Image: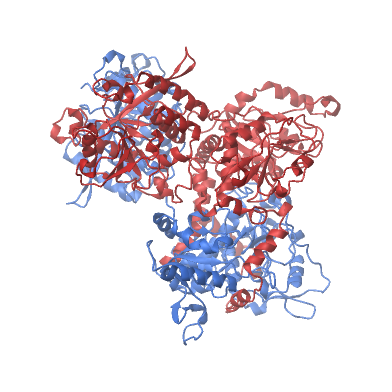
Chain colours: A red, B blue
Amino acid sequence: MQAKKRYFILLSAGSCLALLFYFGGLQFRASRSHSRREEHSGRNGLHHPSPDHFWPRFPDALRPFVPWDQLENEDSSVHVSPRQKREANSSIYKGKKCRMESCFDFTLCKKNGFKVYVYPQQKGEKIAESYQNILAAIEGSRFYTSDPSQACLFVLSLDTLDRDQLSPQYVHNLRSKVQSLHLWNNGRNHLIFNLYSGTWPDYTEDVGFDIGQAMLAKASISTENFRPNFDVSIPLFSKDHPRTGGERGFLKFNTIPPLRKYMLVFKGKRYLTGIGSDTRNALYHVHNGEDVVLLTTCKHGKDWQKHKDSRCDRDNTEYEKYDYREMLHNATFCLVPRGRRLGSFRFLEALQAACVPVMLSNGWELPFSEVINWNQAAVIGDERLLLQIPSTIRSIHQDKILALRQQTQFLWEAYFSSVEKIVLTTLEIIQDRIFKHISRNSLIWNKHPGGLFVLPQYSSYLGDFPYYYANLGLKPPSKFTAVIHAVTPLVSQSQPVLKLLVAAAKSQYCAQIIVLWNCDKPLPAKHRWPATSVPVIVIEGESKVMSSRFLPYDNIITDAVLSLDEDTVLSTTEVDFAFTVWQSFPERIVGYPARSHFWDNSKERWGYTSKWTNDYSMVLTGAALYHKYYHYLYTHYLPASLKNMVDQLANCEDILMNFLVSAVTKLPPIKVTQKKQYKETMMGQTSRASRWADPDHFAQRQSCMNTFASWFGYMPLIHSQMRLDPVLFKDQVSILRKKYRDIERL
Amino acid sequence: MCASVKYSIRGPALIPRMKTKHRAYYITLFSIVLLGLIATGMFQFWPHSIESSGDWSVEKRSVRDVPVVRLPADSPVPERGDLSCRMHTCFDVYRCGFNPRNKIKVYIYPLKKYVGEAGVPVSSTISREYNELLTAISDSDYYTDDITRACLFVPSIDLLNQNSLRVKETAQALAQLSRWDRGTNHLLFNMLPGGPPDYNTALDVPRDRALLAGGGFSTWTYRQGYDVSIPVYSPLSAEVDLPEKGPGPRRYFLLSSQVALHPEYREDLAALQARHGEAVLVLDKCSNLSEGVPAARRRCHKQQAFEYPQVLQEATFCMVLRGARLGQAVLSDVLRAGCVPVIIADSYVLPFSEVLDWKRASVVVPEEKMLDVYSILQSIPRRQIEEMQRQKWGSVSNPLFLPLIPPQSQGFTAIVLTYDRVESLFRVITEVSKVPSLSKLLVVWNNQNKNPPEDSLWPKIRVPLKVVRTAENKLSNRFFPYDEIETEAVLAIDDDIIMLTSDELQFGYEVWREFPDRLVGYPGRLHLWDHEMNKWKYESEWTNEVSMVLTGAAFYHKYFNYLYTYKMPGDIKNWVDAHMNCEDIAMNFLVANVTGKAVIKVTPRKKFKCPECTAIDGLSLDQTHMVERSECINKFASVFGTMPLKVVEHRADPVLYKDDFPEKLKSFPNIGSL
């Protein structure tokens, strides 16, 4: 019985889970069984039903639905081989029936992985800013290749975004231009971006040229035309949408109760001719001028006066009374009715404003619906039931609203706030289809930090990432690997690096020590390293560059990494304590040397400081713990340009790591206990010329900050005003009672 | 709702005729089919539930007695299934009731026997499985016997196996159903679609607009958001009880148990076995069957015989290869045996894929990569395999899940619970009012026998001060989500906590901003396992660890007031009010349980006179008090069914605390003075 249950658990857990999402708070009618019984007694008592009125209990021994030998006989009588079947499928299912299996050549992705080629831009071809941004995002991504023979996916440099013939951005003769591309290959493995298709009055979804077997990444795509797991539905975004970074969501805090001034708002055009006006025409029925404010205007286009109807004047007046921004910020729900096309700008606006979108756009395949579970962030209504919308949203439990609202913000910042994110999400979705067995699951896509920061190539197991311990019911790792970055030759047995090695090795949580030998001098003999109870592995850095300290070495067998500079002074107690803190915050950098950034108004740039300050935003990796995954992310997520900068300067790698981790977590690092003597302040004490003594060193770090911030498109670092000390730190109690007493003696 | 669970408690007594597990299966099946439809958003916010119902006695009639309907040869045939159908184009929502109180109602047509003009039955009347499915629906809360109230209609014509029906005549039978109307809102169930030689991946019976819950859909026949993909029921493993098997390595790494495979697959499997030897077990039919065991329950490898489905439990991964159809009953067997399915069937729409995350319970490998399957599986981390074997995903869902540091400007609301210690209360008010980020002060006057002092007597402070009078002297009153609280952050403070400095309080608020989903407080406490007594123990001594902070002085999110007041499990709230103690421990349990996170203790330990005495006079920090608090921990742990408290060894201090640095340049200089 137990084992049986498991199958049901899988199935019913799915249903329970889904229902949980639907109702958030899980309200069940307590009186359910009661009312049910009444119903029955009524049925039995009053109108004496005939037995037909419910499903009878048959005493017969019924036959099973499948005779025991049927399946076996059928399966063995199939003569078409699976290979033939596949070939047949891929020749039948073309055009509107394209799927990855039938229209995509997987073999192109086998050798070099998921590489994307962008056609060179041709002279005289005008490309609108939005499409420039898309191409720039691809070219700046880790997927980009300039070599078509390496490519798995091809993207046109012809602007296909606006296919409305009446638009000034419309590119003419696309058909012949596309056909003349010698890599076109009937669109196979091509991805075509499109925001607008069709024109007045019917706005069809035709892009106006033969796309062959190409995939569409298209806004406002309908479920009828959408080819599942082949096309990608993207959101409609304006030409002002930022290329990188992007604004944060408007939600600054969770209000409790989660209701805002308006329950439901909308402000937009009403079309007097052409399609897309049915729902908007009816909005005034629901508008109540109090908490449901749905406003339309007829005033758009040249000759609206000619077509205006009896409601126009009244609607226009009401429309002028309200400020859209004010409504957006103060509404719990935002109506997103279809416009001329299925998608409208209102969708992203609502999402950013933490105004839960109420979708009224029948048949719209929602953006990135392949991976995003929109039921967690939006209410998907039916245009036919417009009049029911107010009562429907009023019946949504407040816990559910709280969750929906937070999810809008997560989704906005993870996938929508910049053109780059929209493009990368599109590419990652396609990549997941190609490498199916290591693709991201629904949890990764729908939970912070989201699919763009969780690279499944690192591991297909969620527990190998620092973000899902709570979801899996796991405890954080119990051991760490110390990685010591050595850049100076070993000349004396009293060198700090040896002391440091011994101190780290003595920690009860230490599993092993890795010395990364990034020094030009040859490796010291084995016996020069002190004897320790944990294994010491010396890796000779091949390129001896700064970024190599963050390579995801296979030798690192633990999830936790204690990163150390060779001249760091640290005691075993400090290591122990820092590690126990890290276990509580495994997704952050936890360590000793804290630094801060600030906005320098006079120079209009970011500044870096190592002075004593009341807050910090970085913890340097000279003495810090973090999850091994960040080595992978540093190496594979960051662009070559930033890593090269670090290597050339032999500086700033620690700053870059802090940028990266804060960009992922949206949280500051954590500084542990007192430890002010470090690096810059120790200059002069060390006899040798360390890199910290270099006067340029500091200036370089300033300029690193600004370069990094410009690549990220915003400043990801966040300040913290607290540090974490042992519970009894400097308390007036016998030192013997204190577990981390050595920390106070420093 | 989690019907299977519920049913297994009540089931057997109600309908003795049907095996519990079957019913559970069908109830679950049906509920998920509905869920699939619900997932389209159509009924998003209707309350749904499934429950087996009362014990009404039912007249037993034989299927042989059902009325016979003769179909004329020229009776109308519905249009073929419309592939463009979606909820908004082919589904009539107006039938489904608008009142949120209403449920989706499902009507089942009465059972009839349909015969062609020549008197030949169009299909076998009804199969065991379809009968059980319909019984499950009729026992559910969705069922209605009133056809005019129904939203969904389920024909009693058994379509589970296309092989056992006549396609055209069955379609004619469907078309003459009283509410057919092109199949609008009709839900058909089918597990084995298609027929030789091509085996279509969806039911061939022309069905016009009817919704189809089908096994074996391919991406080309599946109408996303309209159809529902269901698993093919395996009667076989339903008959066999398999023991529970925990996660861990199994004897075989990869197993193929299907008997009728295409020779091409057989070749590939043989190649796999040749390459990887013992780790791969490929089974086939047995040539010489011994008596006693049905053929279906036996599989052989060369001369060696294995019992099926038991052998599935011996393997880590089990192959599910496409056969004539995409949907294979072996998938159900494999899942039931706790083997991780390796699904090799291109374009197959996995069962319930709209609500289930198959990536967490299975491996999907393209047919082309069949020969690489071993290395693909080898690359899966061991712990992930265990996770897949477990198939259950218990987790904490933090209601404040968004990483968000609220702006300082909002400030916090201080709530002082008081009984009648007016002098001390006034001092607390005066002290707290000095904290820069205080935005409002709320005094909860818990004394019904005495009026609060006149307005003029209260300290004059720079922020609004409100007094709330309570109806009863209950400790829970301090956690009520008063409308007056307009900030996210709440500072709960006792009326005798006068020793906290303004710097300490302001700093606590700053720390709370960084951890808005946690309890951030001053006096820390610990729970310990008492090995002698075999139970939990409360500890207030100087310890190196904390797992609780007292709410005599703590910041927390207003949301937790709602949680405490309305969602506290069991009788904890009553217990607290009855004992006049432990409300703070209860709050610690509640927050830790819902967030899975530890508390944050801020700043060094101070000499609190008696922090746990709160406002109750006469209660002192004596042995009985500690015993009672230990009792609370044990009581709450049993109510929660777990010990949610997390132990940590750190506390939060200002960055420059105790640093050798001019005090006047520190943001929070006055910290830790006794």
Q: Position of residue A188 (x, y in %)?
A: 68, 49
A267 sits to left or right of B562: right
- Locate residue B444, reporting x and y percent: 36, 27
Classify A75 as above or below B454.
Answer: below
The answer to whether any part of residue A394 appears in the image is no
In the rendered image of this protein, does residue B305 appear above or below residue B222?
A: below
Whether residue A647 is situated above or below residue B349 in the rendered picture: above
Q: How far from the left and from the top, in percent, is residue A242?
A: 59, 28
Which residue is depicted at the point 54% across and 55% down? A35
Give the residue furthest to the top. A602
The answer to whether A407 appears left or right of A103 in the picture is left
Q: Is residue B583 left or right of residue A552?
A: left
**Residue at point 73%, 71% (across, down):** B167
Quarter of the image for residue A356 reads top right
Pinpoint residue A624: horizontal percent, then vertical percent: 32, 34
Q: Is residue B7 visible?
A: yes
Image quarter in which the C terminus of chain B is found: top left
Q: What is the count of numbered marks?
A: 0
